[in-house]
Image: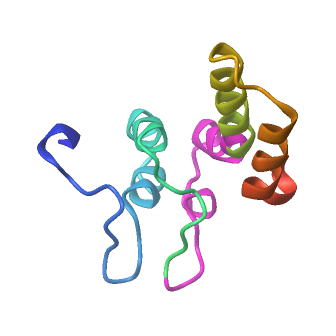
Amino acid sequence: MLSNGINIHKKSNNNGSAILYASLHSQKEVVQLLLSEGSSIYDKTMFGSSCVDVTYNKEIKSILEKWPITMVIIILEELSLNGDLLESNITDLQEYFGPIV
């Protein structure tokens, strides 16, 4: 579906996202795919619920709760592999992620 140009960021009428519905229906592989493709765990429905709020699946909840730090690790590993891990990069990450880093 992604290779056919499906917009994973499109919202439903109540502002629900693909990752929210995948979380709600315990679709772990879909959640992981959507995360790897850039879906946001911070989007909320018009009722104020996020994908972390709607899932009853403990494994998915854990994946979602750890995702912000996972992204930092991925970015740092990529910078390190490219030889681009400089103090200024860390400062840039702190500005981008705010209190997460």
Which quarter of the image is occupied by the N terminus? top left
Q: Position of residue 89 (x, y in %)?
A: 77, 39
Q: Nearer the viewer, residue 15 or 69?
A: 69
Q: Position of residue 55 (x, y in %)?
A: 56, 54
73 with respect to 87 (left or right)? left
Q: Nearer the viewer, residue 4 or 11?
A: 4
94 with respect to 82 (left or right)? right
13 with respect to 2 (left or right)? right
Residue at the image point whose x is 69% and y is 34% from the top: 70
Furthest-left residue in this view: 4
Asked if residue 49 is among those painted magenta in the image, a careful observer would answer yes
7 with respect to 11 (left or right)? left
Q: Nearer the viewer, residue 79 or 45?
A: 79
Q: Main secondary structure of the magenta part?
A: helix
Which coloring applies here? rainbow
Asked if residue 57 is among those painted magenta in the image, a careful observer would answer yes
Q: Position of residue 37 (x, y in %)?
A: 41, 42
Residue at the image point whose x is 72% and y is 40% from the top: 66
- Is 82 drawn above or below residue 19 in the view shown? above
Q: What's the magenta region?
A: 46-67
Dividing the picture into quarters, in which one does residue 81 lie?
Answer: top right
Residue at the image point whose x is 62% and y is 57% from the top: 52
Q: Position of residue 88 (x, y in %)?
A: 82, 41
Q: Nearer the viewer, residue 90 or 49?
A: 90
Total residue callouts: 0
Residue at the image point whose x is 45% and y is 42% from the top: 31
Dividing the picture into quarters, in which one does residue 54 lie?
Answer: bottom right
